Amino acid sequence: MSDRPQPAWVRRRFTAAHFDFDRLVEEGHEHIGLTRFTGVEVVDCGPGWAIERLAIRPDLMNEMHVMHGGILGYLADDAMGFSVFTLLKPEQNCVTVEYKINYLAPTVGDWLVARAQVVRAGRTIIVSECELFAQTKGEDKAVAFSVGTFMVIANPARPAG
Amino acid sequence: MSDRPQPAWVRRRFTAAHFDFDRLVEEGHEHIGLTRFTGVEVVDCGPGWAIERLAIRPDLMNEMHVMHGGILGYLADDAMGFSVFTLLKPEQNCVTVEYKINYLAPTVGDWLVARAQVVRAGRTIIVSECELFAQTKGEDKAVAFSVGTFMVIANPARPAG
Amino acid sequence: MSDRPQPAWVRRRFTAAHFDFDRLVEEGHEHIGLTRFTGVEVVDCGPGWAIERLAIRPDLMNEMHVMHGGILGYLADDAMGFSVFTLLKPEQNCVTVEYKINYLAPTVGDWLVARAQVVRAGRTIIVSECELFAQTKGEDKAVAFSVGTFMVIANPARPAG
Amino acid sequence: MSDRPQPAWVRRRFTAAHFDFDRLVEEGHEHIGLTRFTGVEVVDCGPGWAIERLAIRPDLMNEMHVMHGGILGYLADDAMGFSVFTLLKPEQNCVTVEYKINYLAPTVGDWLVARAQVVRAGRTIIVSECELFAQTKGEDKAVAFSVGTFMVIANPARPAG
C-alpha cells in the first residue's frame, strides 16, 4: 500500500517497507480515554504523512469560545506521532521527545483537521511538522503550525506523545 | 496580596499592582468542559507564578499506560497562561502565541503538578516557563519542561491558550 | 514587483502592497560585521518568502568538521526575518520574538542555503518557517528546519533577529 | 572535582563520574574559527552546568545597534552543549537535536553571559536550559532564554551544536 497517492501538501517523499494502511488506521482508532473524549479520528495516511481530525464542539472550547489551545497541541502531537509511526517497522514504536506549536488564528468551525508530515527520518530521531486547520463547510483556515521531535524505540505498542 | 511568600522554585521576582488572589483562583476554577474533563485545579499562585495540578487516572493515559503527552502540553499551557494572568490588569487578558514542551520521563503516580513562572514580562509579550512533575505520596519526579510566549490583549475574559 | 513568480516550495500566497524587490535586496546586503564575516547574501525574495545563502568554509565549522549549528540558527533567523520584512510597510520593521531549529543532518558541501516563507501574517505577530539545505554541485540536502515568531514594530531600520 | 560548589542559579544536582574540570575548560577553549571570531570563552563549569561569555562589540551587532540574535542563539547552543558535555564519559560526545530561544530584551553592555544547566539527563537524550544576560559593570540583565535537546553519541570529539 506504500504506493497510495501522495496529497499535494506533502512536501517530501518517503518509502516505508512495512506500510500497512489498514493496520495503521485501525491502531489509530484505538479507544483510549482521551481519544474517546476528544473524538480524534485518523482520516488518511501514507508513508510519512497522516491526517487526523476531531469535531469542534462547545465543551472543548475555552472561555473565549474558541477551541482550547491544549486540544490543538494534543492533536498536533498525535498526528505527528502517527506520521512518524507510518515509517516504522512492526517491532518499533516512537515517543515524543518535544514539540512546539504556534497558534495562528482562533479555531471556530466544524472540524479541526491536522495534516502532519515527516521532515526527516533518521535512524533514532524523526522530525515531523503539522499544519492545523479549522474546516467549515469544506473550507480550510490555518489555525496552528507545529514541529515535533520523535525518538524511535523498540516497543510493540502504538505511538504516544 | 502581592506579599504572599514566594516558593523557593520561583527564580525571579515580579510585582503585580492588581494582584487579587481570590479572584484569580476563582477564575482558575471556571468550569469549562475541558477543565471539567481533565480535573485541572489551581493549587496556588502569586505575582508571576502559578501551580496547577490534576489527578492521574487511567482514562487520561495513552496506550503505554502513562499520561498522554497531550495532557501535559495542555496543563503546561494552562499553568503558564495563569502565571502570566497574575501580572495583568483587570482589563487585560492574554493569548498563547506559542509554546514548546520537552518530555523528560513517563508520567505515573498520583498527581500531575505544573509549576509555572514568568521569565520576562514585557508590555506586549510575556514569556513563561513551566516544570511538570509526577507526584507520588508527596514525592516529585520531573516529567516535562515547557516554555511559552504569551501576548497581552485588551479583553476582559480569562486566559486561554 | 509583487507579481514575481513564486517558487514551487512556497506553500502560501501573500500580497505585499509595498513590495520593492530592489530596495529589499539592497537592504539585505547591508554590511554589518556579522554579515561580512559569515558572507550571508540574499539570493532572491518575493512577498512572504526569501532565499539566503552563505559559502561553507572551514572557519565556520565545528570540531567535527561540519558547519557549526550556531551558523545555521543565525542564517535561519536572518532568512525568516527577511521573509517577514517583505510583507511590511516602509515605516515598519520586525524583531525576532523566538525561534526553534531542528538539525537534520551534518552540513557539508559548497553552500548553505535557507529558504524561508511566512506561515501566517497577523497585524502584530508574523510566523515564518525555514528549510536549510547543504548544496553541493547544485544538489540540495536538507540539514535543518526552523520556525520563528516575529513581532511587527514601528521602526524604520532593517530586520534583525 | 565533582564537588565544586554549585552556583545558586543551578536548579538541579547531577553527578558526573568522569568530571575533569581542567580537561573540560581546555577543550572549551579549542580554537575553531567561529570561537575565535566571536571570542567565546568558558568561564566556569560543574557537573551539569556551564557559564560561557563573549565581549559585546560593534561588529557583532545588527542594524539596530544591539547584539545580533544569531550570536545569542549560537552562544546558547554552545553553552548548553557544554553543560551536557560535563556529564558525559570520555568516550561519549553529544550533538544538538534542536533548540529554541526566546529573546527578552536588547543586548547592550560589556559582556554577553550564558548560564546553561541540564534539566534532565537520560541515557540517549539530555535536555538543557540556558539564561543569557547582558552584563554591564557586573550587573546582569536577562536578554534571552533557551531550551535545547541533545543526543549522546559514541564519538571522542568535543560537543558541537
Image (spheres, coloured by chain):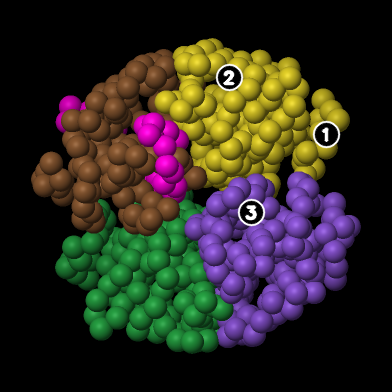
Chain colours: A purple, B green, C yellow, D brown
Give the answer, above or below, for where D102 lies relative to A71: above
Q: Which amino acid does the dot numbered 3 rest on?
A: Ser
* Region rendered in magenta: D134-161
Q: Position of residue B85 (x, y in %)?
A: 40, 65
Magenta part, dominant SS: strand
Give the number of the disc on residue C6: 1
Q: Quadrant of the C terminus of chain A?
A: bottom right
* Residues flagged by tags 1 and 3 on a common chain: no
Please give the name of the residue rendered at 56% of the width and 25% of the height, measured from the top-left corner: C158
Q: CA distance from mark 1 to mark 2?
A: 27 Å
What kind of element bears circle 2? loop
The chain ID associated with circle 3 is A
Q: Position of residue A131 (x, y in %)?
A: 69, 57
Q: Position of residue A115 (x, y in %)?
A: 73, 60
Q: Position of residue C125 (x, y in %)?
A: 58, 47
Badge 2 crowding class, 10 Å Cα cut-off, few under 14, some 14 to 19, many 20 or more, is many
Please give the name of the residue rendered at 54% of the width and 81% of the height, measured from the top-left corner: B34
Q: Would you say residue C106 sits in the magenta stretch? A: no
